[in-house]
Amino acid sequence: MRARFEDYELSDDATRLDLDRVCELLRGTYWAADRSREQIALSLRHSLCFGVFHGGRQVGLARVLTDQEASSYLCDVVIDPEHRSRGLGGWLMRSILGHPAVARTRMLLVTRDAQEFYRRFGFATHPFECMVRPAVDDGRLAHSRRRPSP
């Protein structure tokens, strides 16, 4: 997928992503500031990614985790502060929501401060309570999923 908006380009071609630039953009956020370069690289590899480019330089990103049929999770939506207030966020969201891999799915997102922005695209608060399990990197998760011996 490729789209244009004024002198910006949007692409879902993961080979175009600039890992250094993505790390820089995400380190400026409240939700991903402490992610390592390795964690960011792995998350990109396992996601449908949308890069926003201006003059060949990456200025935005969004990721979607999806099964492409029933469920999607939108995350890491970020536009470089120097390029905000130009309509890029709305254009990015319309493009993502129209992408064939996610257009029919029920999409979840979590935000601390951008609810009004996302409401414009059909997102609403949900009556179910959100639950979170912190990341585990010491093998406890794999161990907890083992079935007990008979």
Image (cartoon, rainbow, N blue to C red):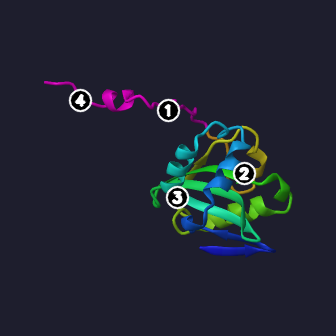
As drawn, 129 above or below 16: above
Q: Is residue 69 magenta?
A: no
Is 43 on the left or on the right of 91, as rendered?
left
* Residue 135, disc: 1
Alpha carbon separation for disc pair 4 and 2: 41 Å
Residue visible at 71% across and 37% down in the picture: 30
Write the start and end of the magenta stretch as one range: 127-150
Point out the tag, 4 or 3, that comes first from the N-terminus: 3
Category of crowding for the residue at label 1, using alpha-carbon neighbours closer than 10 angstroms: few (below 14), some (14–19), many (at least 20) = few
Point out the tag, 3 or 1, that comes first from the N-terminus: 3
Q: Is residue 141 magenta?
A: yes
Q: Which residue is mark 3?
A: 105
**Amino acid type, callout 2:** Tyr
Point out the tag, 1 or 4, that comes first from the N-terminus: 1
Q: Quadrant of the C terminus?
A: top left
Category of crowding for the residue at label 3, using alpha-carbon neighbours closer than 10 angstroms: few (below 14), some (14–19), many (at least 20) = some
Point out the tag, 4 or 2, that comes first from the N-terminus: 2
Q: Quadrant of residue 9?
A: bottom right
Category of crowding for the residue at label 2, using alpha-carbon neighbours closer than 10 angstroms: few (below 14), some (14–19), many (at least 20) = some
**Amino acid type, callout 4:** Arg
Q: In this rendering, which labeled residue sits more in front, label 4 or label 3?
A: 4
Say which of 8 and 39 sits in front: 39
